[in-house]
Image (tube, helix red, strand yellow):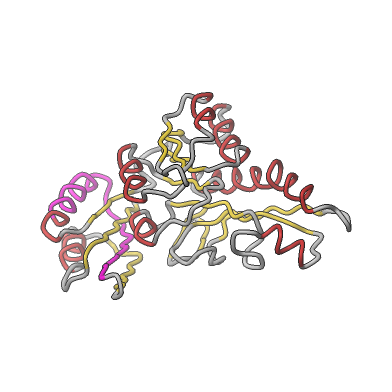
Amino acid sequence: MEVVITALGPDNVGLADPIIHFVTGQGARIAEIQMYDHDEEQIFAMLCRIQIADDQLDLLHKAMRQIGDHTGLAIRVWSSDARPRPKLAICCTFVEHTPRIILEAIRDGQLNATASVIISNRKKLAKLAEEFDVPFHRVGDDSGQTDDDEMVRVLDEYDVDYVILARYMRVLPASTCWQFAGGRIINLHHGLLPGFPGFRPYHDAHRARMLTYGATCHFIIPELDAGNQTINQRTFSVDPGTPLEDIIVQGERENEPACLLEGVRRVVDREVQLHFHRVTARS
């Protein structure tokens, strides 16, 4: 089975050695390894993707817990092969259409996944969680400022496989991205990447007099909307002179939800994966 190991913690020498020595000592094949030293923050981050026998997973979990205790690293061991029906954390803020389509698709059997938790930095969509009987956790204060450590704690509490950013209007810090690296964070960007990144892609495209608008579903890496991790894109066209407000309504209600749903389906059905920051088809 394929397993992703991530490690994050205070920078020091020799942090990767015990992890690599253990997995190679068990005969694992290393398919990908990335290490980062954030000198300004004094943080070490690592991702290691390996191939092991199925019966070695429990031993690997135990060994990484011991290494984490010894080194002070937050180490996570995860495999997309471990569950036939992955557990999702659906993260949202104000826009209802995008999280709703994921919840409806799960309920109707169109998406082979489980909605384990809804996370938001606002309280507006709490009723959506009640409607679909999914636990709701607010991780923001009254101004919407997020407690990122609390968000990670909730993700660990519910043991989620994938984090779905369904118009979650906060930027995840690099520390969160590293802890769930390797293709576990899926984002919906409400514009076509790489042409229209940033927070106001509809406005930017309208200012450029575009007649085609779109959305991008992509894996998250620490570089915001880098664009090379595209899972799915969906477009729609408008007539010249269409008001910006009408374009946004059409995008939010129709195009964005459909784009996100197809992107998430491709991931949970194991059609695609993230490998060295590139989306590749699974063999």
The quadrant holding residue 261 is top right
Q: How many marks?
A: 0
Q: Give the range drawn in magenta.
A: 42-66
Could you tell whether 151 is left or right of 253 in the image? left
The quadrant holding residue 212 is bottom right
Give x and y (percent) for residue 166: 54, 45
Furthest-front residue in this view: 142
Give x and y (percent) for residue 152: 34, 47
Residue at the image point whose x is 32% and y is 71% from the top: 36
Magenta includes 250?
Answer: no
Could you tell whether 279 is left or right of 215 in the image? left
Could you tell whether 80 is left or right of 71 in the image? right
Give x and y (percent) for residue 70: 10, 58
Residue at the image point whose x is 36% and y is 51% from the top: 148
Residue at the image point whose x is 13% and y is 54% from the top: 69
Residue at the image point whose x is 81% and y is 65% from the top: 209
The quadrant holding residue 208 is bottom right
Q: Which of 60 and 154 is in front in this view?
A: 154
Q: Nearer the viewer, residue 19 or 154?
A: 154
Furthest-right residue in this view: 240
Give x and y (percent) for residue 143: 47, 46
Q: Which of 135 and 111 is in front in this view?
A: 135
Could you tell whether 106 is left or right of 248 in the image? left
